[in-house]
Amino acid sequence: MKDVIFQGIRVLADCRCKSCGYAFLHDYPTGFGMCYPVAIGKEDARTYNLSQDKGCETWRVTPLKEGFLKPEKEEVKIEKVVYRPASKVIILNALDFCFSHVLKKLLNAQRYLDEHPEMGLIILIPKAFEYLVPEGVAEAWYVHLSIRALNGWFPRIDAFVKKEWERFEEVFLGQAYPHPDTTRIDISRFTGVQPFDISTFAQKKPHITFALREDLGRLWFHSRLEFMLREILHKFNINIDPILVRRQNALVKSTIKKIRRQLPDAEFSITGFGGAGSFEGLANDYRIPGPDPEYQKNYWFKTYAKSHLVIGIAGSHMYMAAAHSAGVIDIFYPEFYHTYTDDLFFHTKGIRETYLNRYVQKYIKASEVAAHAVAMIRYFKRFNRGLNHDAYHYANKPEQPASKPTI
């Protein structure tokens, strides 16, 4: 290996085979490079899917080849913020083209801050995530690119990193596990908001939040027929999207009313980007047109943190909801089976997480979602009572011999 290349999302090793002289670039074992490593020949641009997982061809292999053959030439603004001095540092590359991928890589910061306090932690991250960078880092290098644009190859990022690391005595590369153990993560260190206190679940007035989206890739459809109709009309440039958003709102309103019949004191909130229609008289509406970090922290995250449940279509937007709320109901598309559990944030390692985090099918009826929500809240105390009894057997105590029952 003769060099390290910060391509953007990836960190690549510049290598040459000692036996045959073949020159190639190879993923460092960081981020998704651990799970789906790819190599590419420097002279022939031939790619090697080393994981042999065909599912990663479109999002791991193809972007590498396209970027290698046509790197981005424009300038990239990178804002360096120094929070404290350090001579030995760990660089955590949290760049990615997907919101939840960036977030999960960022969560690795807690491990390095706690386990390596003698080192300075530097986070390379999109500017849009500045509001989530935790206290204690030495530096943050904010890349002024949208996450959608980050699938390219950016020589400017590589040049910036190499220039900056000359300032340090030692530089280590953070592994940026793509699926960190969330049971060890204190989400409040990133958002400043304490998550739902599960010990108060049965005492608090029920609060249910709907995390809505208005893009067609993440809508709650009434039926398969409705979805197929939209697909057919779209081919003829007939746009019925506003109608479908209104119909989604109708499903949400119906669900609220059905839950309220069973849980009369329940409160409801709505979050998400958009604003079509009105939920006046039914729910507190915290939807906004587009990203607003301060608003999201002060309204969305705090709303999730007081929610027994958050209901929404499975996707990256549900990750922060799951991180702060007690539980979620994910309306899941079969097309995304390969991302199963990607948007869940488990708070404990016990069976409680399977009770409080549920996936339901794409065309589920409002009555069925309401039935799930009511049952999850109404029977939690009964479920938790059994769970707490079972916990006795995991205490660090010697096993006691079974005694005959007293009659």
Image (tube, rainbow, N blue to C red):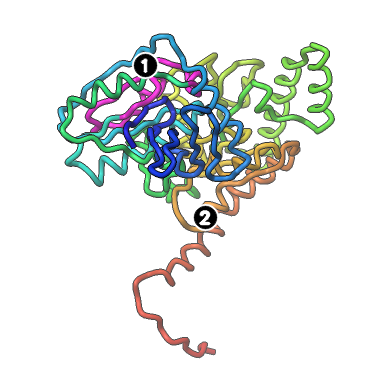
Task: Look at the picture and state if 65 lies above or below 236.
Answer: below
- Of badges 1 and 2, the one in the foreground is 1
Position of 128 compared to 329: left or right? left
Q: Position of residue 7 (x, y in %)?
A: 41, 25
Look at the numbered disc 2 and give the secondary structure of its residue.
helix
Q: Residue furthest top?
A: 74
Please name the residue shown 46% across and 55% down the image: 349
Q: Amino acid at mark 2?
A: Arg
Q: Which residues are magenta?
A: 123-152
Mark 2 packing: few (<14 Cα in 10 Å), some, or many (20+)? some
Please name the residue shown 55% across and 20% down the image: 287
Q: Amino acid at mark 1?
A: Arg
- For label 1, the residue is 156
- Residue 133 on the magenta segment: yes
Residue in the foreground of this view, choosing between 57 and 208: 57
* Residue 119 visible in this rendered orientation of the protein: yes
Look at the numbered disc 1 and give the secondary structure of its residue.
helix
Q: Residue furthest front?
A: 20
Q: Which of the labelled discs sits on residue 352, or is there none?
A: 2
* Residue 196 visible in this rendered orientation of the protein: no
- Residue 206 on the magenta segment: no
Q: Position of residue 344 (x, y in %)?
A: 52, 42
Please name the residue shown 74% across and 21% down the image: 244
Mark 1 packing: few (<14 Cα in 10 Å), some, or many (20+)? some
